[in-house]
Image: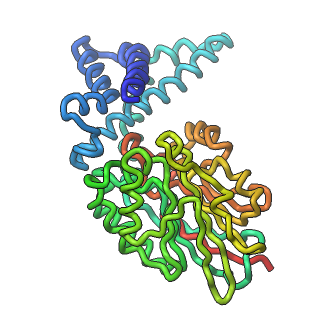
């Protein structure tokens, strides 16, 4: 996997060498220095692993991780902006428009692209690592009992606790969540990145999450990458009620709501039980309103056919960058960010509370602590 990523970023560097560094004004030594910096930024994961023998987000201080993220994001944005410039220039050239050749060769435009990439990358990293604001979502799932009108759920997802998003950051998220005084808190996967021994201190603040109807949790794909069974034990010890193809019944003002939770399909790569909706729903009394927690939103249509009124998911990080994030929509069957109607069911896909340290950027897709307020239809 690391080698494949290194090859991809190597190809990106070669493209930038040709279309960004080469056209720049200035002496050759300066261009060579810039080319070397871009190479180190593009391949920083491989460089850190070779020098330090570990994953950057597990061993480096937060300040260095932020600088490396800024550098890597600059490379990605340089690629995107250069491709846009080249596509526009080629179209103009093919259509025999005079500006076509100038767009492709203009040195001032190339410098402008570089400056814009650096600025946008800095802003994007800040948006990625800051403690998220609260986003309130009002919805009326079909079949919601009147007793649950005004019921408040806080959804956290994709926390990805690492040295980039450490214990104090998690603690701040917990404090903001508790301040909302929700009836129920749900955590829809990808709570951490790393082994329990390394990240236990960072996730420990989750034990302070409190809600009258409890704190429910389902695993995401990242839970399986490093000692799944160990992490499930840790989360239960912290007071999170883990739903692994299982359900709980919530009683509120004399009325019952079923909340079912699924495992992630990454489990099958490790010989563990994959998502099993039938098992999760087994034993729920007929006619009980149903909410499903699933880390990935791509199976929403199947879940809707089960009769669920509401599904809460994460995984996509909202696409992280508005525009290129459309690729994330394609990879998740059309679901990437916000509220959807899937048949009669409502699906909410959170942008994520945190994000994976390997791609720390957000532009137009802010992180969120999601407060969901349920309303019963008249």
Q: Please state the horizontal and vertical placement of residue 270, each as a whole percent of the image.
A: 47, 42
Name which residue lies at 67% across and 49% down: 299
Residue 196: quarter of image: bottom left
Residue 191's place in the image compared with 204, above or below, is above
Residue 245: quarter of image: bottom right
Residue 124 visible in the snapshot:
no
Residue 21: quarter of image: top left
> Where is the N terminus found, in terms of image quarters?
top left
Q: Please state the horizontal and vertical placement of residue 140, each as a whole percent of the image.
A: 72, 71
Q: Which colour scheme appears in the figure?
A: rainbow
- In depth, the one of 366 and 205 nearer the eye is 205
Residue 136 visible in the snapshot:
yes
Q: Please state the horizontal and vertical placement of residue 274, each as a whole percent of the image.
A: 57, 49
Name which residue lies at 54% across and 60% down: 244
Residue 17's place in the image compared with 259, above or below, is above
Q: Please state the horizontal and vertical placement of residue 134, each as a whole percent of the image.
A: 49, 67
Residue found at the very far bottom of the displayed protein: 253
| Drawn side of residue 378 relative to residue 179, left or right | right
- In depth, the one of 22 and 192 nearer the eye is 192
Number of labelled discs?
A: 0
Name which residue lies at 39% across and 66% down: 173
Name which residue lies at 36% across and 69% down: 237
| Drawn side of residue 117 relative to residue 28, left or right | right
- In depth, the one of 6 and 262 nearer the eye is 262
> Where is the C terminus found, in terms of image quarters?
bottom right
| Drawn side of residue 232 relative to residue 281, left or right | left
């Amino acid at each position: 996997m690391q080698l494949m990523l290194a090859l991809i970023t190597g190809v990106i560097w070669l493209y930038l060498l040709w279309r960004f560094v080469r056209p720049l004004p200035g002496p050759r030594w300066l261009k060579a220095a810039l080319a070397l910096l871009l190479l180190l930024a593009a391949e920083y994961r491989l460089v850190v692993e070779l020098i330090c023998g570990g994953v950057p987000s597990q061993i480096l201080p937060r300040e260095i991780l932020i600088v490396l993220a800024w550098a890597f994001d600059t490379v990605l944005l340089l690629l995107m902006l250069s491709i846009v410039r080249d596509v526009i220039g080629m179209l103009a050239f093919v259509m025999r428009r005079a500006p076509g050749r100038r767009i492709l060769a203009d040195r001032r435009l190339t410098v402008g692209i570089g400056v814009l990439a650096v600025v946008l990358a800095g802003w994007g990293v800040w948006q990625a690592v800051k403690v998220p604001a609260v986003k309130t979502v009002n919805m009326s799932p079909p079949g919601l009992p009147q007793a649950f009108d005004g019921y408040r759920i806080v959804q956290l997802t994709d926390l990805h606790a690492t040295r980039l998003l450490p214990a104090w950051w998690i603690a701040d998220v917990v404090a903001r969540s508790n301040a909302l005084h929700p009836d129920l808190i749900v955590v829809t996967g990808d709570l951490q990145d790393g082994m329990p021994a390394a990240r236990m201190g960072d996730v420990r603040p989750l034990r302070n999450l409190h809600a009258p109807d409890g704190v429910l949790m389902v695993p995401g794909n990242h839970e399986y990458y490093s000692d799944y069974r160990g992490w499930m034990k840790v989360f239960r010890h912290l007071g999170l009620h883990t739903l692994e193809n299982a359900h709980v019944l919530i009683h509120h003002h004399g009325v019952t709501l079923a909340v079912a939770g699924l495992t992630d399909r990454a489990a099958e790569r490790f010989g563990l039980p994959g998502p099993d909706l039938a098992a999760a729903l087994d034993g729920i009394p007929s006619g009980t309103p149903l909410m499903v927690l699933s880390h990935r939103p791509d199976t929403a249509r199947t879940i809707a056919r089960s009769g669920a009124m509401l599904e809460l998911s994460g995984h996509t990080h909202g696409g992280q960058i508005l525009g290129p994030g459309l690729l994330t929509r394609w990879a998740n069957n059309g679901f990437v960010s916000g509220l959807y109607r899937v048949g009669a069911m409502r699906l909410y896909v959170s942008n994520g509370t945190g994000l994976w340290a390997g791609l720390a950027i957000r532009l137009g897709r802010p992180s969120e602590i999601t407060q969901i307020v349920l309303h019963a239809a008249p």
